[in-house]
Amino acid sequence: MIPTPLDSAVLNSKEQYIFYHKMVDFVLKELIVSMQQEHLCTQQELIFFKQYSDLLLYSIDAMRIKYMYDEEDDLKIDLTDSGFPNYLEFRFLYNDLELRENYIDDLVDTDTLKSQFLNTLLRKKQPIKNRELQKASSIIYYTSVDKNLIFNRFVQGKILEGPENANYEYMTSWSFYDVSHNRPFVCFMYFDYDKKDAIKDKETIYKVLKESADREMPLDTMAYNIDRKLEEIRPKHIKRIDLGPLHNVFAKDENQITHTILKAIAEKTVSLDSYALSLKIDEVFSGNTFTEGGFFTKQTMQKWSEVENKKYLFAPHRIIQLLYNQVPRALDTLEKEPILMSEIK
């Protein structure tokens, strides 16, 4: 049994780090399969979504290495409708690796450390002290973790040309970790481009997306901001996936689903590794155009449809049963019945 106090949102043992990473890894991989089976995304969207999920998992594994033998600090899971690491944990990772060169020279040589470990284990027949294990984890952390693979506050995807018969010329994706919600969001935009080649002009497009679409906001507001700042772009369809909350033993929010699962874990009616994952997909589509501005600053803008909001819940069979028995009203707003996922092995 992993000692996980239900009144704490801090991971503070090797077992908890391993267990938490295993849980998130399992849930995200199951989610990708379920999204494909339920046709919630196109094949191209799923490819992008998996890439962003891989960055998220890589970052959480880097946190595991960072904190494994750190006696001064612990990994913090967010308290507010999330279940994912606090945004500052990603920032700490990135800042550490920015200063990587400053630390590399101070690290103990790996061959020397190996000899010390073998001498302690085989000759002295003693366990290795935590301080020495910290040195080993620091070597792994600073020499193996790639700063470019950390899930940063904003991650930009490539611009791709649309298929020959598509009703759009290009599509792109981006992801951001919203600071107020501490959850990852993945966005897709399908658009036409008035100039010759959007891929050649990608830096301008990327700059506007980073400035105007790097946080949670009403989707039609995001669409309007992008349309206004990029005169040459005519967005056709914008889709945003809100990933979370991840309802599990490490989440400590007031969400009804989280609370129900935590209560059942405390009463030992479900296992410690029980989970559910909420997911919301918002979409908006362009229609007619209108002109905005004065005589010398006229700009043709898109009229947008009402935002489509669809909520989904993914969970194993035992948890779905629990929620129907305990909080059936919490499931009334879902787009469809809770989607079945496997239990963690």
Image (cartoon, rainbow, N blue to C red):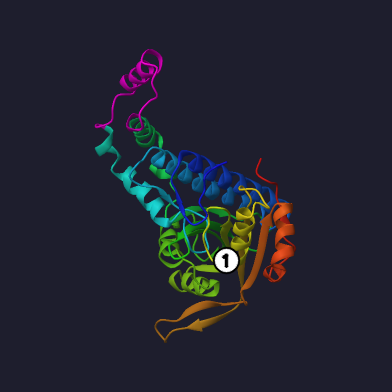
User: Quick check: 142 left or right of 25?
Assistant: left
Query: Which residue does the image show at 53% across and 45% down from the upper left?
Result: 20
**Magenta span main SS:** helix
User: In this picture, is 220 found above or below 16?
Assistant: below
Report the residue that reaches farthest toward the bottom: 295
Q: Nearer the viewer, residue 108 or 207?
A: 108
At horizontal 39% and vertical 83% (from top left) the residue drawn is 296
Whether residue 196 is visible: yes
Give the quadrant of the N terminus. Answer: top right
Magenta highlight range: 105-132
- Residue at numbered disc 1: 255
Residue 29 in the image, given as x and y percentages of width and height: 62, 45
> Is residue 78 positioned above or below 52 on the image?
below
- Front residue of 147/17: it is 17
Image quadrant where residue 192 sits? bottom right
User: Viewed as shown, does residue 40 lie left or right of 68?
Assistant: right
Instruction: Decide whether residue 108 is among the magenta residues.
Output: yes
